Image (cartoon, coloured by chain):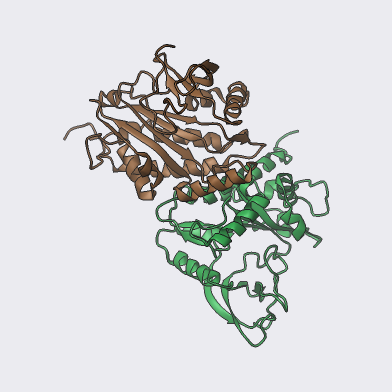
Chain colours: A brown, B green
Amino acid sequence: MSDLHPPEHQVAGHRASASKLGPLIDGSGLFYKPLQAGDRGEHEVAFYEAFSAHAAVPARIRDTFFPRFHGTRLLPTEAQPGEPHPHLVLDDLLAGFQAPCVADIKIGAITWPPSSPEPYIAKCLAKDRGTTSVLLGFRVSGVRVVGPEGAVWRTERPEVKAMDTAGVRRVLRRYVSSVADEGMDCALAAAVYGGKGGVLSQLRELKAWFEEQTLFHFYSASILLGYDAAAVAAGGDGGGVTVKLVDFAHVAEGDGVIDHNFLGGLCSLIKFVSDIVPETPHTQPLGPS
Amino acid sequence: MSDLHPPEHQVAGHRASASKLGPLIDGSGLFYKPLQAGDRGEHEVAFYEAFSAHAAVPARIRDTFFPRFHGTRLLPTEAQPGEPHPHLVLDDLLAGFQAPCVADIKIGAITWPPSSPEPYIAKCLAKDRGTTSVLLGFRVSGVRVVGPEGAVWRTERPEVKAMDTAGVRRVLRRYVSSVADEGMDCALAAAVYGGKGGVLSQLRELKAWFEEQTLFHFYSASILLGYDAAAVAAGGDGGGVTVKLVDFAHVAEGDGVIDHNFLGGLCSLIKFVSDIVPETPHTQPLGPS
């Protein structure tokens, strides 16, 4: 526990510092997320507890698309010296990656649970309209790409805030391009987005669950995409291509109704990603030439 | 043209009268919809013209899920004596039905095109939040059920305005129940919702198109369900089960993005309908007993 530090692969939200709480890792494969202020933190804990134990959630969905939850823990923080803060303890989704690449995409045209107080709805709505959320059904919160040799490209906050549809298309191409290549060659698109176990295939499996599940409405949750550029460059099946839902401070009960808002945004993201995969050069078929 | 009158199967919007414009039929199989005020009427004409001629719209989709468009025509109206009003000329979707049953369902959690003026957005948003639109991704605008002998059950406006999730479930059961039966027996569910050519099968075909199409965003459009209770009661394949999109005054260009808002609501409607079909008694299998 002495080695707590902010993860370098964090792309959205506040970074832990002397003035702010933020997520921490300790190199053991766990990810510590400080409970948010107000009732959001408790709400997220309550979601993880309910979700982890819910008999109607298929094990395959829980294990594939959600971080594993290990309870909560009080941790010392730089922002609150002498006053330990409760943290969610989750799996670090990118633990062990040599060159962790990550994209955080907030899903849904509507990010406010209908039961929220008016000022909160007004604030969210302004943000949903001012970003691509209403138009695309999702917005990109942050992207970080690392080349196999360690060169890093990442989105900056002003760029993220101003990102339009063309910007979303660019950054989704950038996410699977050689990091040094300004031309966005999409060199890794087939390996990361395509194929069995790729992002598209995983998103489609998630979509099938959202067409049926009426347990939870995932307002303001994100899909976190991850892969290890070093492993992908090395070839084989070990690229660590990951698709996970995160950020559950605003999840509402589904009450027998599907989460059409998340599902619509997910379908839109699937279309954006599938528009990129066919652009990659096809592998030459084996055989006499 | 001398026999113009409001269709008895109209379930939403203003009914044509001495004080209001409203749709008319003349018994020839055509449906005349008065152009709406402001730019809405022209906008709807422009949509029908663009859509009818669009090479990227599959003929099967256009013919199955949209009313046929026959241009516009100036017609005399009771509300504006001596001042003919332009009308869209469309197929009457229920022409020839002996006992026309109809449900008008406005699709989408968001009914306002993002480019709309602020007061219009505020007005729509209040309505979307005050009805089931935000929660379910659709709201029921009106339902009319006619028994084979002519008994009629229909929603009244106050009931429609106050309809909650349970009310939506009830009315979707009522739509396929014997009209005299308060218990909502869902006697026609298998014939109308289920089977090849039934509502569910048609909605799923429509959904597959919406997962791909990026031409139009159908803000505030409705799905009109129709069937002929007399034909369904008579058995056979001739129940006239119909699924059509209508009301295109607020359609926006898709600009390469899918209509996640319509698609999400459509998926939600599919789930509601599919929750009803399995409740119906199964047909006894043929064979020795």
- Residue visible at 53% across and 16% down in the picture: A74
Residue A108 appears in the figure: yes
- Residue visible at 39% across and 47% down in the picture: A162
In the rendered structure, the answer to whether residue B3 lies left or right of residue A91 reads right
In the rendered structure, the answer to whether residue B147 lies left or right of residue B63 reads right
In the rendered structure, the answer to whether residue A52 lies left or right of residue A164 reads right
Residue A277 appears in the figure: no
Q: Nearer the viewer, residue B94 or A79?
A: A79
Q: Residue furthest front?
A: A82
| Whether residue A204 is situated above or below residue B175 in the rendered picture | above
- Residue B202 rendering spot, x and y as whole percentages: 57, 51
- Residue B167 rendering spot, x and y as whole percentages: 74, 48
| Whether residue B214 is situated above or below residue B97 in the rendered picture | above
Residue B220 location, quadrant? bottom right
Q: Residue furthest top?
A: A2
| Whether residue B254 is situated above or below residue A275 in the rendered picture | below
Quadrant location of the C terminus of chain A?
Answer: top left
Q: How many marks?
A: 0
- Residue A48 rendering spot, x and y as whole percentages: 57, 24
Q: Residue furthest left?
A: A289
- Residue B257 rendering spot, x and y as whole percentages: 43, 51
